[in-house]
Image: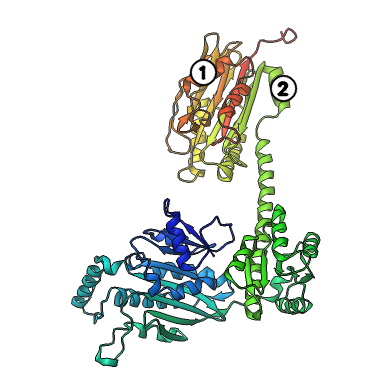
Amino acid sequence: MIIKSILADDTEGTKRIAETLGFPAPQESSTCEPTLTICAQPGGETIRMALLPPFVGLVETNRVDPSCWAQGGKRFRLHLQCGGLALALRTVTAYSEDVAHLFSEALHPFLRNAGFICPSDMELVIHEALANAMIHGNLEINRTPSGSVEEMLQFGEKVETALATPLLADRMVWLSAAIVGHTLHLAVEDQGAGYQGFSGGRADRRPHGMELIADSVLSMRRENDGRCLLLELPLTQRQLPRQAFADASVLIVDDNPFNRRMLEALISTLGVGRVDSAQDGIEGLAAIAEHRPDLVLLDVMMPRMDGFEMCRRLRADHALLDLPVLFVTALDDTKSRSTCFAAGGNDVVSKPIEAEEVLARVRVHLQNALLMARLNADRNRVREELEAAREAQETLAPTPSQLAAIRSRLNLNIKGVVENSSEMGGDFWTLYDAGPKRLGVLAADFTGHGLPAAFNVFRLHVLLSRLPRRPPSPAELLVLLNRELKALLKPGQFAALFVGLIDLEDESLTYAGAATPAPILIDADGPRYLNVEGPPLGAFADAEYEEHRIAFPVGSRLFVYSDALVESQVDGREICDEETLLHWIAEAQGDVVTTILRNFHARIPGDPPDDLTLLHIRREAPTALQD
């Protein structure tokens, strides 16, 4: 167990709390070490996170008198040392954050991972026990309402008044739980006056409402003069079919032959398909390299190489970081257990071993290992499918041979590139035949990233494949595509799209756009932005688009791009505004796409933050042979 503080600059305060609790001083934790959080005024989300593995609970420190630990918290400490969950909170925090629900919520996976089914009325038990400790203990309210509206209102006023009294509201309440055999031990501790029975003529101040949960627990007893209520709840073992572990493999590393045979017999009762053994750490590492088991049961004290050193070397091999290691050791002091976790262990079982405990822990770790193996297999399958889909998406763009044929036939030198921000993206560009001396150009940018955006790219490609032999004008094409995409896209999805039609006979470029960045024309006068406007595709059913026509003589160039080029930022500033882009194009000697990509990635290395498309078209003079 280690302590982690989320108090700002309060290392010494956290250290004192750690010493009070009897745990090691605060230190850096690894991903597998149980960690107790120290926090001032935690909210519900902080409490919830403090109960998620590897975190095992939380101690509130704000306005808390350190001397309170001398009055209570004994079961809190004991349950943590037994591998349980625990919360130490001020009464006002526990009351306002519905801690009973948060704690019950955390116990469900805690019990499931230990191989048990969660009791159905566990949250009710926690709620009533906690309410009794807070209201009738710490807040010193010794009556409960009869059920009438008037008494309920009076009772609520008493609670609110008590919570507004710092002396009462700042009293600690300790809530903890641990698994002992086939029972769940729950403890609720407070700083109240304690339980006063009928002796001495005093009224019974406890237990209010306890009759509601009496039938749900195996036993109910009090400690520390009634300030601690200890409850035992029955647990039912989760049964897994024997064939569940038929493909699993376990390695036992122990120098004692009797221990090895006993563990082998125990593990075999779970239906584990393969059980191997080794006598020391050296043999254990060799067996792992050869058989790659799903779980290692590891002794500590062994000749040649002990368990600590073996586990350290195992973790040094990055390929085996996910292999669970369960230490089985006679060293049961806190320091030794901490060393097991520090060496890279996932769990610890003390000798002499309890058969049911070993089986429960082995079952949990094997189940997790098999789930991880299945997850890795699914991840590999998804990776392969994504790679196949990415390759299919790349085939949608014109091939080098197609671009070479267009250059030879129409004297149009075209270069386009798409860089996705993830495996697949929503950017796409293509060309379409519009007649003997005419060529259509299209560049699209769908909202989102990854597979959803990529699916929309394939949808658009299918729509374009249905174009008539003589395609409509750019504005008419946008109207047609908008109508189709409005019916196909989900709400919130749309596309920005540029369509251009280059006519070599009248040396013109006719174009239209839908929410696309302004394209750039480069001619004898230099680069300049073209007017383009129109709503995005798929957003409005009755959208209309404005069409433009400009001269496009020999030597003219067109540059089209997606908004990732001009909207990407570093430290809150755009790396390429409109003026910068014109400057980059002007400085390009020949290959505009390469120049802009180089400048872009000099400022944003690696994958772009959004899908990026660059498309450059230059109209060249006909060769003498063509003339």
Residue 76 image point, x, y percent: 45, 72
| Residue drawn at 41 percent across, 69 percent down | 101
Rendered view: 494 above or below 236: above
Q: Quadrant of residue 618?
A: top right
Quarter of the image that includes the C terminus: top right
Q: Nearer the viewer, residue 322 or 537?
A: 322
83 left or right of 268 in image? left
Rendered view: 66 above or below 569: below
Q: CA distance from mark 1 to mark 2?
A: 28 Å
| Residue drawn at 66 percent across, 68 percent down | 326
**Which residue carries the number 1 mark?**
582
Any part of residue 336 in sight: yes
Q: Nearer the viewer, residue 259 or 543?
A: 259
Rendered view: 457 above or below 366: above
26 left or right of 618 in image? left
281 left or right of 522 in image? right
Residue 25 image point, x, y percent: 51, 60
Any part of residue 105 in sight: no
Q: Residues within 10 Å of mark 2 (few under 14, many from 20)?
A: some
Amino acid bearing label 2? Ala
Residue 422 image point, x, y percent: 60, 41
Q: Residue furthest left?
A: 150
Please tell me which of labels 1 and 2 falls first in the chain. 2
Q: Nearer the viewer, residue 275 or 583?
A: 275
Residue 179 is marked as none
Q: How many marks?
A: 2
Residue 558 image point, x, y percent: 57, 19
Amino acid bearing label 1? Leu
Residue 404 is marked as 2
Foreground tag (1 vs 2): 1
Q: Quadrant of residue 441?
A: top right
